[in-house]
Amino acid sequence: MNYERFIAQKLSGAAKKNFSAMIFRIAIIAVSLSIAVMIITTSVITGFKNGISNKVFDFWGHIHITDGKVGNSFELIPIEKDIELIRDIEDIDVITYKRPPSVVDVDIIPREETSKGGVRSVETYTIVPGIISSKRKFEGVLLKGFEEDHDLSSIKEFMIDGEFISYQEGPSRDIVISKQMARRLEFEVGDALIMNFILEGEQYKKRFAISGIYKTGLEEYDRRFALVDTRILQEVLTWTENQVSGLEVYVDDIHDLRLLNEYIYFEKLPRNLYSESIRSKFYQIFEWLELQNINEDVLISLMLIVAIMNMITAILIFVLENTSTIGLLKSIGATDWSIRKIFLYNASDILIKGIFWGNLIAFILCFIQLQTGLLKLSEKEYYLSTVPIEFNWFMIGFINIGTIVITLIFLIIPTLIVTKIQPVKALRFD
């Protein structure tokens, strides 16, 4: 029989009748609140990062393939819509790949990596700058063209009024503008607008009808982009039907983004084409999202310190209250480590109760937010209208297990006081 565990249970029962009971309750509450805050923090930050990332990926895809001379300013340099190349990229499944050594990264030795998935789909896009003219105002925009066979399911999720582009036999004159654009220019669904194009020093005008209004919540995109039929842009630019601005590649697993981008660039593309992941193309947004990891780490560390300090205080008080018991156990031959284990058993009981209630509180609050969207955000500043929740089960498990392990390791220190207690003095004191 584990006598340390048995004595720990008896001491815990006796503690309910004295001052230790209040200290134990405070420790359980502190651990519960710390665990709840840690789980809520990681769930909110995970939801925040994934929510914004998914909006960017839904609008742009994961990898862009363009002419090698195109930078980030959307120059009007077309590439050929190579059906064989598109099918070749779409056929990419799970790969094991080691990229060639880079002249830039001479100190880095490439290693072989295996992807979790492959390429889901490849879509074309065309982007042309233009100027919307209304009765009172002018607005510079970028027109993004979509083909009829483009997978529009993710784009249509952003529609808040009207319908998406109505494709017909000839180029459609429908246009979808953002809610921000519509408010600024005082447009509604069904209104007509004139789009001005400046190409090679010449001005061209096209008449469009607003078929719908979208809203991504991403201020930079909503302010700049309007959506149209690719064929109308090809007509404006005098491009052939096989010429587009680029290809958008959608991958199965976002964690494969860097690996698949390198594989496509080095192994699939001809020399005149260039591939770039959206993470590097719009690096400002993703660097900002990565900074949220610092906030998460700081808050979790602070909550862990709070839990540890409260547990140390509780165990110290409990040890001092049971000085005579420690003296008695030592007098009958109990080792210092056996006695310390008794108090560590008590500490583990407090931790388990605190973690149970902390998880319960966190999941209840997160569930309420998921169902009601009770807590709101300024979409202009945070790109999301409500506080997002997404459970990172690995991180939640790490928080629970890590809290138990780290706290118990730290609690070995206050139990060192057991080694300083002398049986003769302890029993005489009693």
Image (tube, rainbow, N blue to C red):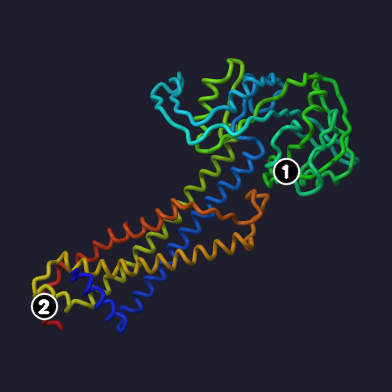
In the displayed structure image, the side of residue 189 where residue 399 appears, left or right: left
Q: Nearer the viewer, residue 172 or 325?
A: 172
Mark 1 packing: few (<14 Cα in 10 Å), some, or many (20+)? few
Q: Residue 257 or 290: which is nearer the viewer?
A: 257
Residue 238 position, x and y percent, is 81, 19
| Eye-nearest disc, 1 or 2 | 1
Instruction: Give the SS element for disc 2.
Output: helix
Task: Name the kind of residue labelled 2 in the image.
Answer: Lys
Q: Quadrant of residue 108?
A: top left
What separation in Å lies between label 1 and label 2 (alpha carbons)? Answer: 79 Å
Residue at the spot 84% in from the left edge and 32% down from the top edge: 168
Q: Which residue is mark 2?
A: 425
* Residue 346 in the figure: left or right of residue 266: left
When asked about the image quadrant of residue 213, the answer is top right
Task: Examine the rendered structure and indicate whether residue 311 appears above or below residue 406.
Answer: below
Q: Quadrant of the N terminus?
A: bottom left
416 relative to 123 in the view: left or right: left
- Residue 320 in percent (x, y) is at 23, 75
Judged from the image, the secondary structure of the residue bearing numbered disc 1 is helix
Residue wearing tag 1: 156
Q: How many marks?
A: 2
Label 1 sits on what residue type?
Lys
The numbered mark at residue 419 is none
Residue 145 seen from this side? no
Q: Nearer the viewer, residue 383 or 120?
A: 120
Quarter of the image for residue 248 reads top right
Residue 183 x %, y %: 81, 48
